Every structure is written in C-alpha cells, then in structure tokens.
Image (cartoon, rainbow, N blue to C red):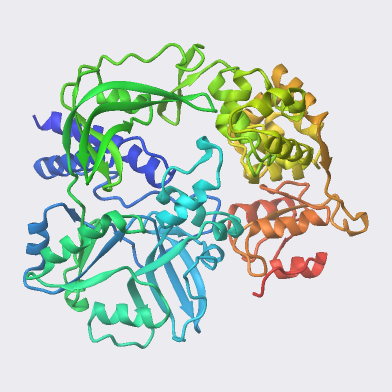
C-alpha cells in the first residue's frame, strides 16, 4: 500500500509541476484550476500519510525559474506562497481571537519595488520566489505608480501588477483578428510586464496595487499593518482594497467581498487574511513553503450538474480546431451557461467525454465556464477526421506536451476568411469597410481567392453596390481605402501574411534585419533566422516553411505587384557604425531598455547580435568586471568589454533617458 502511494506521489508531482510551469512560466493552461487544486490536495494528503515529500514537490518548491531575456536578481527575503482554504469557518478559526487585515487576492504578477531618496530605484518580479526578473523600466510605465514619493528613506514594498477587465476588453476590441485576441487579463499582464521594450508595456495600461510594506527606513508603525497601509497611501500608492476584521465580523466582510465580484474591475482569485499585529505574525515563523502570518481564501466553486449534448468543433485562421462542450443550460453565478471551451485534445481525452455524459460545470474565478468533472466517463467522443468547415483532412499535433487538432487543407474557408480578416486589419494593410461578414460574402461570391484580389474589387462594382448593407457611397469608400492601402511598408506586408508567430514587432525586426528586402527574406534559411535575437528556431522554421511554399511564393509575387513599398531613408553619412557588430547584456542606465540601445546602434548602421563571436566589435555591459559567461567569452576572444557610458562616448551615441 505504501509503495502504491509513493508511486502516486511521483505521478502527481510530475503532473502538477508540468501544469504549474505551463501556467506561471509559459502563460498557458493545460488543466483547469479546479483540477489542479484537487490533485494538489490529494498530493498533500498522501505526503502526510506516507511521510514522503519529494524535493521537486510543488508543496515545498515555490514557482519556476525566471526567463533568460531579462536580468535576474535575488530577493533579500524569499517570497513564499500562501497556505489556502475554501472554508469560511476555518478562516474565522485561523484568527484565534486576533484581529487581521482582509483584502483581495489579485490575479496578476507580483512585483517588489524599491524606492530611494524619493525615487523608484528598482522593480523585480516574484520569479521563483528566490530570484526574480528586473523590470524597472517597465514599472515606470505603470499607469498609477508614483515615480516620486515624499518619503526619502529606503522603502521596499510588494504589490500586484494587473490589467483591469475594462482595459483588457478595450485592448482586445482593437484587435480585429479573433484568433489574435488575448485569452485573459493575467496572461496579458504577465507578458506586458516582462517585455524587453517598455513602450509595449506602456500601451497595455498596467496598474500596480500595493499589498505589503516590507521595510521603510527609520519608520515606526506601532506594530500595525493598518498603519503601514495608511503610510503607503500617503506616499501616493493605490493599495489593495482591505478591511480590519475580527472573529465577530469576518464572515460578514467575506460576504461583502463576494457581493462585489460581478462588478469588480480588477482580476482576483480570492482573498488574503494577514494578522494586524506585525510582531505576532512574524513570531509564528514559516513552514517550508508558507509564512504563518497570512492565509489565502479561495472561493468555493459553485458546481452544477448537467448533461453533455455534444462537442462542437470550432475552426480558426491558423487551422487549429478547438473542442467546445455544449450542455443543457444551467444557472452559474447568476447567469445561464450552456457551453464551455475544452481547450485542446489533451484535456478532452483526460475528461473522457461522451455525448449524454453527466458532467459538473463551474466558473473559474467565478467568470469563465469550465468542466469540473465527468461523472460518467463514457469516453465516446471521436476526434473528427475531417474539418467541420471545409471537409479537409485533420491531424492531431503535439506541441509542448499538449495535443491539438488541426485542419491540413490550406484552402479551408475558415482559414481563408480569418486570413483575409487579418490582412485588412489596422496593423496590417488597414483597409476599412471589410468586416469578417463582408469578407465571407466576397469569398462565397468568388470575388477574392488571394490577397492581390482585394485590390481588384472594382471588377465587381455592380454586384457590390447591390449587396445588402452596401450602396454607391459605401462602395466608393471601400475602393478609396483599398487604393490608399497600396502605399504601405514592408513590416505591414509581412505581418498581414499571417505567418505563425509573426506579430507586428517581429515583422518590424525581420524587415530591419534584412534591410527591407523581400527577396532576402524569402531566401533566408532557418539557421540565419534563428541567429537573430528574439527569433529562435520555432519562429524561424515557421517563417521559412511559409516562404518556401510554391503557392505562397506566387501569392506574394502577385501581392507585391499591387503595392508601392515605402523604404525607410537612411543618411549614408550617419552610418558611422557600418560593418560593426555589438552585443548588449545586463541592465542599462541611459536607455530605457536594450531595444532602444539596439535601435540607436542600427540607426547608425551597426548590428546587434545575441552572442559574442570573434567578429564582435565590443560587448556592452555596465558590470565590466562580472564573471558572466558573455564577459568570459569576450575576454577569451579578445573582444573589449565596455560600459554603456564609455560606449556612448566612444561611438557617438546619445542617451534616450536621464540616468
């Protein structure tokens, strides 16, 4: 029996670590929150019963390693997770006669801020709890974060970076391509905060809400968390909504928070309870994973049992076909729900779904409908061998341990319409008057078969004018917009093609690297593309595969014949760094981020690469004496390592910000 339990522990650790890494480090979900919590609780129970706790168990480890793209820094004190409960009475008993602060548990990205002499000096993400990523320049763009405060001593505080639901919807509404829309505010926030270019962060309306003061040099708060919150508010920080509670009023206060969930604009996944008496809380110490001064309260999911009617298969521009569960309508959190995404084939198979099965459903974080459990597990749903839109052959592909269904027909109507929708969108060719519904009509009527056809809609003037919703005026506006789109830039063209993983930023980067030469881009190989910083083999392979397909070559040729491409003008006399190669590493003082310094170098004809070679002119690193791998390689190859300031002086580069 003990052996079987230990084997189950090993299995659970593997499953939970994989799910945790996907969620926290890769911003994707491979199982529901409810399923994760169930397996986590099972693991804890088995660990207590057996006394066996593996070194990599999620019950003793905290988070995952920070990504390599941003500088890393060790936290002065570990940032631990919180123990949790879904039992309201257990929450009251936890107080044991003490008063505490009850606040929202926000669902974003935890940040540690340091202020010195009244100015923000440093911002670091939680990372793995021990080591985080330095995102100081990105934090400076947070909408509500004070850059200067009255307090001039060293101040260290923790809080949550979030994107409000209203801002999230506004950002998504500006994206015309349905497939390109962001999935949820947390993932968008995580990606926004960890950008290498803080201009992108600034556009995402990220906000910061303080939830804990770590230290304030020379200050005495009379041992009160409430006093600390008051102090932070006086410094200009927005703090997480919080209330002082006791055993007498905590349940009413929890109910107060519960009533606000539907209208609360900030993503939240529960509440946090922290002892008001700071010294008392600290005296309780910590476990291997949890501090004992606080506990998290997770909302008990409202479960409803219903019957699965069918699985609907929804095709997209990329060829991905998503399973959607259709079930008998049920009331959940005050709304009627009858469908829920199953996300992918892996989750579909793990649930063992079948038509007529009895299932339980809930709303993740009381918002997103999900299947909690399949009570019947008939496992009779068959994976379709043909696409529901075009009838073309489908195939199951596995990417990063997740299986998904794809349509293999390049001429699938779903792909066509979505592809045309992206092509005419604002960041692409920016052609007004072509909604997805209109494009669908044009495809059905045979007006458009490829991108170049959009520039010859005048051939069908009579039919378009007679179409419902059109007329002479609408037609003329459409043709004007089409003709205006003929004058464009190469990055817009590359983005408009809809190549997998090539967004606006990547399109600009590739065009710049290949000197705005479409032929060079079409002839590039995977090795060349992979060597470009920020590209990698996956993006490179997708790009080369697209450019080498005969149909795509012909489509691009036909499209380019319709366009006038604006090539950025370069003053040859300013190309003082022509033929030189540079590598940038570490944090910067005079530029907001590495991309800004890279742009400055490239504007003078220089190139920036990701690794040091014998062809590198110099390595730019403010920590000249560090023992980093890049510094070591530079010294081995005889490549100079110079500071940002010395580089600017030596090569005539002007700063973009005040240090």
For the point 18% across and 29% down, which residue is it? 306
The residue shown at (29%, 87%) is 220
The spot of residue 459 in percent (x, y) is 77, 23
Residue 247, given in percent of the width and then of the height, sits at: 8, 69
Residue 34 in percent (x, y) is at 23, 40
Find residue 468 and report its image quarter: top right
Badge count: 0
Determine whether 602 is above or below 483 in the image: below
Q: Quadrant of the N terminus?
A: top left
Q: The C terminus appears in which quarter of the rendering? A: bottom right
Quadrant of residue 380 within the rendered picture: top left
Residue 227 locus on image (x, y percent): 27, 82
> Is residue 216 visible from the viewing direction of this image?
no
Q: Residue furthest right?
A: 573
Whether residue 144 can be seen here: yes
Q: Nearer the viewer, residue 577 or 419?
A: 419
Q: Please state if 373 lies on the left or on the right of 78 as rendered.
A: left
Question: Where 374 sits versus 48, above or below?
Answer: above
**Between 149 and 654, the one nearer to me in the picture:** 149
Residue at image point 38% right, 59% down: 130
At 23% from the left and 56% from the top, the residue drawn is 288
Q: Is residue 452 left or right of residue 126?
A: right
């Amino acid at each position: 029996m003990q052996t079987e339990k230990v084997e189950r522990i090993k299995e659970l650790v593997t499953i939970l670590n994989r799910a945790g890494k996907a969620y926290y480090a890769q911003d994707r979900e491979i199982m529901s929150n409810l399923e994760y919590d169930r397996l986590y609780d099972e693991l804890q129970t088995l660990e207590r019963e057996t006394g066996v706790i593996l070194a990599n168990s999620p019950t003793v480890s905290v988070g995952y390693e920070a990504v390599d793209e941003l500088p890393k820094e060790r936290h002065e004190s570990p940032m631990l997770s919180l123990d949790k409960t879904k039992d309201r009475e257990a929450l009251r008993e936890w107080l044991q006669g003490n008063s505490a602060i009850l606040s929202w548990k926000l669902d974003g990205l935890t940040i540690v801020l340091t202020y010195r002499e009244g100015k923000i000096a440093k911002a670091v993400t939680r990372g793995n709890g021990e080591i985080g990523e330095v995102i100081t320049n990105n934090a400076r763009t947070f909408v509500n974060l004070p850059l200067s405060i009255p307090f001039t001593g060293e101040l260290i505080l923790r809080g949550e970076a979030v994107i409000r639901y209203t801002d999230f919807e506004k950002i998504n509404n500006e994206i015309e391509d349905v497939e390109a829309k962001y999935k949820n505010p947390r993932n968008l926030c995580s990606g926004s905060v960890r950008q290498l270019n803080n201009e992108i962060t600034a556009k995402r309306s990220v906000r910061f809400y303080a939830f804990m003061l770590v230290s304030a040099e020379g200050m005495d708060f009379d041992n009160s968390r409430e006093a600390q919150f008051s102090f932070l508010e006086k410094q200009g920080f927005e703090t997480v909504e919080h209330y002082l509670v006791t055993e007498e009023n905590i349940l009413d206060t929890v109910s107060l928070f519960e009533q606000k969930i539907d209208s609360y604009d900030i993503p939240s996944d529960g509440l946090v309870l922290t002892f008001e008496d700071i010294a008392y809380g600290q005296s309780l110490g910590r476990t291997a994973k949890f501090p004992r001064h606080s506990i998290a309260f997770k909302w008990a999911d409202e479960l409803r049992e219903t019957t699965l009617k069918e699985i609907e298969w929804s095709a997209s521009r990329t060829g991905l076909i998503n399973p959607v569960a259709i079930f008998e309508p049920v009331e959940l959190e005050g709304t009627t729900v009858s469908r829920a995404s199953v996300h992918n084939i892996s989750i579909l198979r793990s649930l063992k779904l079948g038509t007529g099965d009895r299932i339980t459903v809930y709303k993740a974080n009381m918002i997103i409908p999900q299947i909690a459990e399949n009570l019947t597990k008939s496992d009779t749903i068959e994976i379709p061998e043909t696409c529901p839109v075009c009838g073309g052959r489908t195939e199951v592909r596995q990417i990063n341990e997740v299986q998904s269904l794809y349509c293999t027909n390049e001429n699938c109507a779903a792909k066509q319409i979505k592809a045309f929708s992206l092509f005419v969108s604002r960041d692409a060719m920016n052609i007004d008057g072509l909604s997805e519904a209109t494009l669908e009509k044009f495809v059905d009527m045979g007006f458009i078969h490829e991108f170049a056809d959009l520039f010859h809609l005048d051939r069908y003037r009579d039919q378009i004018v007679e179409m419902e919703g059109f007329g002479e005026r609408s037609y003329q506006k459409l043709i004007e917009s089409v003709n205006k789109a003929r004058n464009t830039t190469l990055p817009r063209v590359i983005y408009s093609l809809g190549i997998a993983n090539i967004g606006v930023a990547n399109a600009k980067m590739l065009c710049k690297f290949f000197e705005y030469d479409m032929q060079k881009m079409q002839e590039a190989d995977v090795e060349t593309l992979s060597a470009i910083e920020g590209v990698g083999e996956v993006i490179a392979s997708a790009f080369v595969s697209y450019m080498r397909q005969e149909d795509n070559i012909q489509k691009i040729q036909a499209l380019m014949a319709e366009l006038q491409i604006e090539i950025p003008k370069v003053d040859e006399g300013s190309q003082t760094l022509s033929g030189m190669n540079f590598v940038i590493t570490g944090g910067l003082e005079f530029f907001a981020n590495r991309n800004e310094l890279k742009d400055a170098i490239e504007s003078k004809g220089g190139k920036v690469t990701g690794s040091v070679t014998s062809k590198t002119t110099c390595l730019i690193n403010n920590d000249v004496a560090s023992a980093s791998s890049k510094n070591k390689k530079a010294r081995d190859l005889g490549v100079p390592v110079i500071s940002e300031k010395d580089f600017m002086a030596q090569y005539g580069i002007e700063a973009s910000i005040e240090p």
